[in-house]
Image (spheres, rainbow, N blue to C red):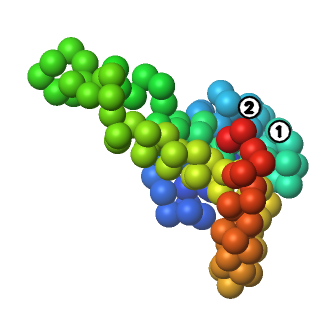
Amino acid sequence: MNIVDIADREALSVAYVAKLLRLLRKAGFVKSTRGVKGGYQTTRPAEEICVADILSALGGDLYTPDFCHRHSGHARDCVHILDCGGRAMFMGLDRVVKAYLSQFKLSDLVHPERELREMVGERVEELPRRMAGSSV
């Protein structure tokens, strides 16, 4: 499918779709083909592509180790750089979000909303056990 078709189908601007596809191509999720019948396609089957990995490629993580060094206050670094309760909370939230999104594959997103809601409910219930045994 080409950029214009994707933009029309999803009611997004062509420029925005191009930006997203550039990020996905750079991360190795899609490849492009030139020519009249050209366009974009996934590099692997949708059943093998994790939603968490796609979102990480598109926007990064909620919390990254350099988060505190990107402080936008008046000082060079955050005043809580050595002892921050907020950092611990955001690190935990990032871990929960990654564990949750790691349970979904790109192929799951084509299900009707009602079916996906059922999947979400099951996977939310599974999350504590999954987190206890994972290194996410």
| 59 sits to left or right of 36 | left
Q: Residue at x 33, y 28 (%)?
A: 83
Count residues near mark 1 (Cα–Cα under 10 Å), then give few for <14, some for 14-19, many for 20+: some
- Mark 1–mark 2 Cα distance, whole angstroms, equals 7 Å
Q: Secondary structure at mark 1?
A: loop
Please determine whether, in this image, residue 75 is positioned above or below residue 53. above
Q: Nearer the viewer, residue 86 or 106?
A: 86
Q: Which residue is mark 2?
A: 28
Q: Are marks 1 and 2 in contact (CB under 8 Å)?
A: yes
Which quadrant would residue 129 be assigned to in this image?
A: bottom right
Question: Closer to the N terminus: mark 1 or mark 2?
Answer: 2
Q: Residue at x 86, y 42 (%)?
A: 44
Q: Is residue 114 visible?
A: yes
Res 43 label: 1
x and y, in percent, of residue 91 in the image: 49, 40
Identify the residue at the far bottom of this view. Answer: 114
x and y, in percent, of residue 130 in the image: 75, 55
